[in-house]
Amino acid sequence: MPPGKSEIIVFDDDIPLFGFRVRAGGSRTWIFQYRQGGKQRRMSLGSATAINAQVAREQAAKLHALVKLGHDPAGQKLAARAQASETFAALLGRYLAHKKASLRPRSFLQVDRHLTRYAKRMRCVWFCADWWIVLRFSFLPY
């Protein structure tokens, strides 16, 4: 490793935007780097010890095709991660804050207790833009 550098990236000659990164700590990963909408994006394809070169090349070729078609694989990955974090428990706090202003104190306590207690039994997985309507009608009997 040259002095002053924390990582070295060597790009492949055959597959554009595909490379191999070696860090000062010793980790070695396959990467795919591209530019989308003026932003530089870099995705890790996996550790060199876990994925062999042929599998990493195939993944990079698929990602390169997606980028050429105008897709943003890293952006899609971030969006999927954000959507997965919107669980019922995360939305419940926002819903209760919304309802606190419109319900009487005792009614709010009952709604809060009921939703908090029975939230694990809810079968509501997908939330739409009007999520409080989904919550209101999503209790299904077992």
Image (spheres, rainbow, N blue to C red):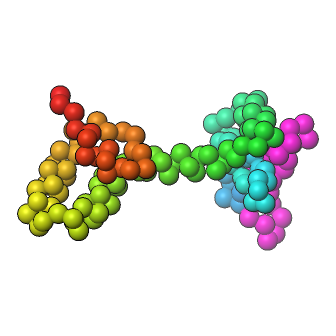
Identity of the residue drawn at 63% across and 36% down: 50
Q: Residue furthest right?
A: 13
Identity of the residue drawn at 72% across and 52% down: 42
Q: Position of residue 15 (x, y in %)?
A: 86, 38
Q: Nearer the viewer, residue 45 or 105?
A: 105
Queried whether the magenta region covers residue 18, the answer comes back as yes
How many labels were placed on the picture? 0
Identity of the residue drawn at 22% across and 38% down: 139
Would residue 97 be visible to someone looking at this image?
Answer: yes
Would residue 60 be visible to someone looking at this image?
Answer: no
Q: Position of residue 88 (x, y in %)?
A: 32, 48
Q: Is residue 4 left or right of residue 102?
A: right
Q: Is residue 80 left or right of residue 113?
A: right
Q: Residue furthest front?
A: 102
Q: Is residue 119 left or right of residue 78?
A: left
Q: Is residue 70 left or right of residue 112?
A: right
Q: Quadrant of the N terminus?
A: bottom right
Q: Position of residue 18 (x, y in %)?
A: 80, 43
Q: Residue furthest left?
A: 106
Q: Nearer the viewer, residue 59 or 47?
A: 59
Identity of the residue drawn at 45% across and 46% down: 84
Residue 36 against residue 47 in the figure, above or below = below
Q: Nearer the viewer, residue 85 or 139?
A: 139
Which residues lie in the magenta part? 1-21
Q: Position of residue 10 (x, y in %)?
A: 84, 50
Queried whether the magenta region covers residue 99, the answer comes back as no
Q: Quadrant of the C terminus?
A: top left
